Amino acid sequence: MLGNEAMNKKKYFDTIALILSVGFLVSGCGTSSQLITETPPLSTNTAIPTFALTDTPIPPSTATETFTSIPPTLTPSLTPTETFTPAPDGEVLFQTDFAHRHYPGWTYLEGTIPPISDDGALRPIDDFWFSVGSDTWENYRVTVEFVSTPGCGSNPSMIFVRASDRFTGVAFQICDDSVNLMRVYTPASGSYNDVPDSKVGLDGKTFSVDVVDNNYTFGGLTETAEGNRTGKVYFEFVQGTAFKEITITQLP
């Protein structure tokens, strides 16, 4: 017979076994109140998605470019006035001897331009007009070397100094190897006045006149005449005239 202590242990273990067996039975029938948390399985698909690119053309722009023309801004410019600076005394303003068969520095006006002959002279066949110089020329000497001069009974050759055109200024008639007459243009009357006793012979067929202030010196004579204080030199050489050299020199 088992003792009391042994009997008590046996009951204890039997009770434990009963409890355990009942718990397994309840678990198997799904009646347990135990909460079960499930973790969804991770996807094992490691493929990287691909994307197809499509080329979608962009329609051309139909906008029209508009250009607005901006007119340029004009800056007014002042036209400088001519400033005359006198040449140094003795400077040659114009010279030609026709040796090279050309007419440098001339302004042709009228008539037939004569050819240069073998002796270097020009022999007009009609009234041949030309001018030399500037409207600002003031004091100067004009020298012309003639080969021959026309007769005084016909149309004389003419040299005009301080002239603004071919009918103004102070004129000298050249004929019969002399300065036959000095004539002064008067703007008020629009005509020439003859200077009395102004006939002098040419010095070896060379005509020369110094124009300084209101004084005109030629062939040993000095005449005073009011008129233009500046101007060009005009020449009218007629048939029967032959000339070789023209020189114009600055005077003080």
Image: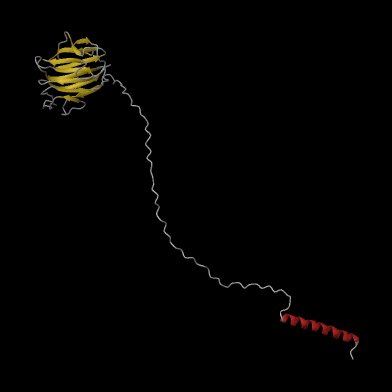
Q: Nearer the viewer, residue 142 or 237?
A: 237
Q: Residue furthest bottom?
A: 1
**Display coloring:** secondary structure
Q: Nearer the viewer, residue 142 or 154?
A: 154
Q: Which residue is rendered at x = 81% and y = 82% of the image? A: 16
Q: Is residue 144 visible?
A: yes
x%, y% of residue 156? 12, 17
Q: Is residue 203 visible?
A: no
Note whether 39 is above or below 251 in the view shown. Answer: below
Q: Which quadrant of the figure has residue 77?
A: top left
- The number of callouts visible is 0
Where does the N terminus fall, quadrant-wise? bottom right
Left/right of residue 1 with respect to residue 124 in the rendered view: right
Q: Nearer the viewer, residue 238 or 178?
A: 238
Q: Which residue is rendered at x = 85% and y = 85% of the image? A: 11
Note whether 66 is above or below 214 in the view shown. Answer: below
Note whether 38 is above or below 60 in the view shown. Answer: below
x%, y% of residue 135? 26, 21
Q: Which quadrant of the figure has residue 57?
A: bottom left
x%, y% of residue 233? 21, 20
x%, y% of residue 230? 26, 17
Where does the C terminus fall, quadrant-wise? top left
Q: Residue furthest right?
A: 4
